[in-house]
Amino acid sequence: MTLPIDIEIWQGEIAELEVDAVIIPANESLFMTAPVAAAVKRHAGDGVETEAVAQGPVQAGSAVVTGGGRLAAPYVIHAVGVGHDLQHDAARLRRAVDAALDAVDHLSLRRIAVGPIGVERGVFTSSEAAEILLERIIDRAEGGSGTPESVVVAVTRSEELAEYQAALEGLVTRAAALPLDESA
């Protein structure tokens, strides 16, 4: 089966990618303290965090858009998949991913990069977070959303790379096993 969207799993620093936006994990106060967010802040400059914090605090399950500062990406989308309560809440993580993808749609962005959302402080395993993230991206693309056209999922560790690749392969395999929709 061919996916309705180009998805690449890549190991490296998300802040270095030349994309239309980077989606990073955030906390409800929007301070960029999680490892991926802190790396983005180092590259983008303090202004990105200042702009984010000015929009907060926000509820878990939401997302906030800021400028990209010194990044090649003109936007940073801060997705709050895990709250201060550190609850393992898959529905809330899905809402955060959807909120971030809603921002991508609203801005008509074509190529985005996404860091692992939900794994901060061990609330979700990489496998769980990968499955939720990739499922939401694919479901939205199958639903006719034209944006984004391509996604780079940027992970930092080789273990994450293997888990995200396995999750993507699993989703493709499951989708290929589904009966074709004869009404199409």
Image (spheres, rainbow, N blue to C red):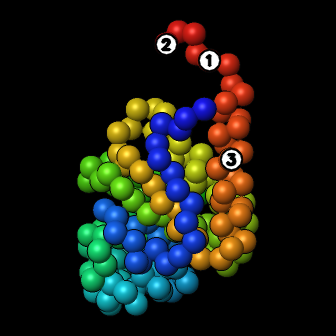
Tag 3: residue type?
Glu
Q: Which residue is mark 1?
A: 180
Q: Residue at x 72, y 28 (%)?
A: 177
Question: In the image, is residue 61 above or below residue 147?
Answer: below
Q: Position of residue 75 (x, y in %)?
A: 30, 68
Using the image, tell me which numbered label, if any, was put on residue 12.
none
Is disc 2 surrounded by few (<14), some (14 to 19) or many (20+) residues within 10 Å? few
Image-based side of 99 in relation to 10, left or right: left
Using the image, tell me which numbered label, if any, was put on residue 169.
3
| Element class at badge 2 | loop
Q: Which residue is mark 2?
A: 184
Q: Residue 141: in sight, yes or no?
A: yes
Mark 2 and mark 1 in contact? Answer it, CB < 8 Å: yes
Q: Residue at x 37, y 48 (%)?
A: 148
Q: Position of residue 28 (x, y in %)?
A: 49, 74
Question: In the image, is residue 43 above or below residue 157?
Answer: below
Q: Position of residue 146 (x, y in %)?
A: 35, 39
Distance from label 2 to label 1 (Cα)?
A: 9 Å
Tag 1: residue type?
Leu
Q: Position of residue 107 (x, y in %)?
A: 26, 53
Image-based side of 81 in relation to 178, left or right: left
| Element class at badge 1 | loop
Closer to the chain start, of discs 1 and 3, is: 3
Tag 2: residue type?
Ala
Is disc 1 surrounded by few (<14), some (14 to 19) or many (20+) residues within 10 Å? few
Q: Residue at x 58, y 54 (%)?
A: 133
Q: Which quarter of the figure is the N terminus placed in?
A: top right
Distance from label 3 to label 2 (Cα)?
A: 25 Å
Is disc 3 surrounded by few (<14), some (14 to 19) or many (20+) residues within 10 Å? few
Closer to the chain start, of discs 3 and 2, is: 3
